[in-house]
Structures are given as C-alpha cells and as structure tokens.
Amino acid sequence: MIRQVALLTLRAGCTPARLRAFEAALDAADRELGAVSHSQLGRHLAGSLCGDYTWDVRFAGANPPTLEALLASAPLAGWFDPQSADCVVADTDAVRFAPQGREIQAPALAKGIKRTLLLRVAPTTPPEICERFERDIQRMPGYVAEIRNWAFSRTDSALHATDWTHVWEQEYDALDGLQGAYMLSPFHWGYIDGWFDPEFPQRVVEDRFAHVFCGTPSSVLAWE
C-alpha cells in the first residue's frame, strides 16, 4: 500500500461555493482516477499549524503517478493550476510512504478526528537513536487509550521528494481525545517531549513541524 498525505493551503478570496465544489472533487478522486483507490479531504480545525486541508490518498498500485501528474489530471487540474480561474490551492506540501507501524482498534470509526504530525529528524541523528525515537513514539498509544487508530511511518523520498522524515497519525472519537488526553498525557510531557525540546540533550526533532487535525467521516488509517 502506498499512501499520500498532502497539506493544502488555500488562495485568498475563495468563495464558499467554489470551496464546496473543490471539496467534492477531491473526495471523488477515487471514483474519477484509476490510480487512486481511496481519497478523503478534511478541513483543518482551529489550532492546526500548517495549511487549510489534509488530503489523504491511497493509490491503487505500486507505481503511482507523480504528484505533478496527479494534480494535472483532468478532474483536478483546474483546482491546482495557478493559471486557471477555478484555482483554489496556493501550496501543496505532500509526503508519500508505505505505512509501517500501525494499529487499528476501531476500523468502523465514523465522524471522528484525524490528527497528522509531519516532522523532521535532524540528519545528523545516529540511526540507532532515530530507531529509539521511533519506538518511543509508537509506545504512546499504550498510555493514551483515547487513540483509537494510529500509524507511524518514515516518508519515502523516492516516491516524492520532501524534507519531512516521519508521519505520525492518530484517530480519535472526539476532539477532546486529542486536545485533552493526548496533549496532557504525563507520558507525552514527561518523556516524549524530550525528543522535541531544544533544552533536552536527547532532542532529535527539528523546530519546524506540521500539526494539523480535522474531522473525518470515516477512518483513513483503516484503509486496506
């Protein structure tokens, strides 16, 4: 399975009617494009850092079209082409990867919350330290029962060039699971935060990251 997570930033001045049409077009990409087996678009909620939408895609085969070819395809081109009167997207920040660590406890989750964190581990980090960081992140669901589904993966620059190194995704029944239980978890602040905090010697994650969350009509992480 190859997935894509793209953070989309809107152009200024998009009308509500144009945005509704844009949302419908991206949600229908799995029906309009043979290379796409699943597609879901989520508008970011207040408090997200980076972009206005998360666009999740699962590709139908092992050799997906490039991002440029995907965005230039007939059903999508007008929304992304800056020369088009219909263009609504000012910037697309995408990663592609084969999902790695993953646990699905609620495959039928509906009307929940999907949170995505894109991060970059410093390139000078020794491999064994990076692997320890990855193991620690994947321990978090054991301390936060509100995480219903999760996935943690390294990005694949061979599929699409990116500065992001990892994708950390979670799904919750409700927003409080993220903003309450997860964000206030003692394991989060007492242990995991050391990998991110510049004042901790174990820190490996660089300052720039994307923390976004949106409503999800159905589980993305349970896609098979």
Image: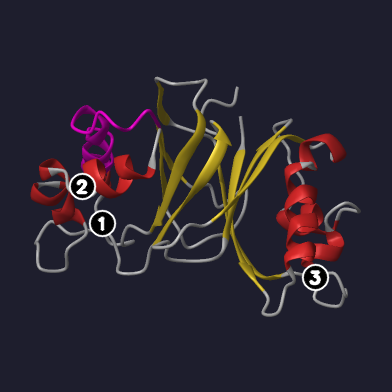
Q: Is residue 175 left or right of residue 193?
A: right
* Mark closer to the chain start, 3 or 2: 3
Q: Secondary structure at mark 1?
A: loop
Instruction: For the residues labelled 1 and 2, say whether their Cβ atoms are less than 8 Å apart.
Output: yes
Q: Is residue 157 left or right of residue 118?
A: right
Amino acid identity at mark 3: Cys
Label 3 and label 2: CA atoms lie apart by: 43 Å
Instruction: For the residues labelled 1 and 3, say whether their Cβ atoms are less than 8 Å apart.
Output: no
What is the magenta range?
A: 131-149
Q: Is residue 207 magenta?
A: no
Task: Say which of 208 and 124 sits in front.
Answer: 208
Sort mark 2 into few (<14), some (14-19) or many (20+) by Cα contacts within 10 Å.
few
Amino acid identity at mark 2: Ile
Residue 224 found in image quarter = top right
* Mark closer to the chain start, 1 or 3: 3
Q: Kindly identify which residue carries mark 2.
A: 129
Q: Is residue 135 left or right of residue 148?
A: left
Q: Kindly identify which residue carries mark 1.
A: 125
Residue 204: x and y in percent read: 23, 58
Tag in front: 3 or 2: 3
- Residue 20, compared with residue 106, is above or below; it is below
Q: Going 80% across and 76% down the picture, which residue do you hit?
A: 82
Q: Residue furthest front?
A: 16
Residue 106 found in image quarter = top left
Q: Kindly identify which residue carries mark 3.
A: 87
Task: Say which of 1 and 177 sits in front.
Answer: 177
Q: Secondary structure at mark 2?
A: helix
Label 1 and label 2: CA atoms lie apart by: 7 Å
